[in-house]
Amino acid sequence: MLPHPQHVTPESPVSARTGPASITDAEADSGVTAWRPEMSIYHQFTCEQCGMEFEKHLGGKKARNRFCSKQCYHQWRHNKHFFMCSYCGITFWKANKHAGQKKYFCTAGCDSAWRSRQSIDNISVRFWASIHRGSLEECWNWVASLGTTGYGQITLRLDGGPKKAHKSHRISWFLHNGHIPLGMHVLHKCHNRLCCNPTHPYLGRDKENQADRINDGTSNRGERHGMHKLSEQEVRGIRLKYSLGNASYNRLALEYGVSCGAILCIVRRINWAWLP
């Protein structure tokens, strides 16, 4: 082993006092046990809590070079310090143990609002990358993936909820007007399912939505329904025969291959009420 030098040079910021060197795990595994002077040179530091100067060698962690003792370190962690809220900009007191964070918030409400704003910013970037924009009068068509109903769809997470597919025109309304009220639908003035122009959609209830579908011819009523058994001509024939008194419910049910209840609903205009 080499002797430890004991030279002192006060004018130098680095103390020449040396001590036992720190050996890394890799060096210990490789069998290196020799002491090296450059590993144990002591430096002078100033405690951030009490202001006292102290010496520590380079083998210690950087965090340990900020405080002279564990007592000063724990006292510093519980001291109050000024932080600025990342959302509202208000300056507030908080314990030093939270120092080093990327963002600080004065209340849980500011934290939630900031996260919501960041989420909306990310959604906006993804959303507008899939829109073919034009003038305000034209339709801004969605050019990405489509759902089974022909509407544009985008998969994302809103307000911390589960990640799922949302219709593109509803996201367009959300980005420009906020949350959609419960029980309301986003309807199109232009009757274009792919349109995401923020000036074209409007809010409406379920009754208005159904009426809009009927006017557009996109409703699945009558023969457009996938499980229909009768045509419009057959429904008119059932009503005509019953009105003339030539057939009963049972006879009409056997003739057209449906139940008596179905004939009753047709005659009383419970079903197929929109047919004259």
Image (cartoon, rainbow, N blue to C red):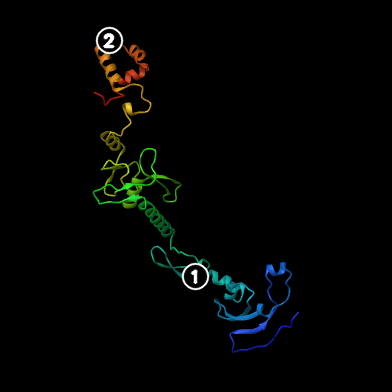
Residue 224 x %, y %: 33, 29
Residue 126 x %, y %: 39, 53
| Vertical relation: 179 (above or below) 247 | below
Q: Looking at the image, is mark 1 or mark 2 earlier in the sequence?
A: 1
Q: Amino acid at mark 1?
A: Lys
Residue 198 x %, y %: 29, 49
Asked whether 12 or 268 is in front, the reply is: 12
Residue 62 x %, y %: 59, 73
Quarter that holds the C terminus: top left
Locate residue 250: give its quadrant.
top left
Instruction: Residue under label 2, please give it.
Output: 246
Asked whether 48 or 16 is in front, the reply is: 16
Instruction: Residue under label 1, please give it.
Output: 80
Dot 1 falls on a residue whose secondary structure is strand
**Residue projecting furthest to the right:** 1
**Residue projecting furthest to the top:** 246
Whole-Å distance between the Cαs marked 1 and 2? 94 Å
Does the residue at mark 1 contact the one at mark 2 (Cβ under 8 Å)? no
Q: Nearer the viewer, mark 1 or mark 2?
A: 2
Q: Amino acid at mark 2?
A: Asn
Locate residue 146: give its quadrant.
top left
| Vertical relation: 48 (above or below) 135 | below
Quarter that holds the N terminus: bottom right
At label 1, counting other C-alpha atoms closer than 10 Å, the crowd grade (few under 14, some 14-19, many 20 or more) is some
- Describe residue 48's horizontal placement relative to residue 22 as left or right: left
| Vertical relation: 71 (above or below) 120 | below
At label 2, counting other C-alpha atoms closer than 10 Å, the crowd grade (few under 14, some 14-19, many 20 or more) is few
| Vertical relation: 261 (above or below) 34 | above
Dot 2 falls on a residue whose secondary structure is loop
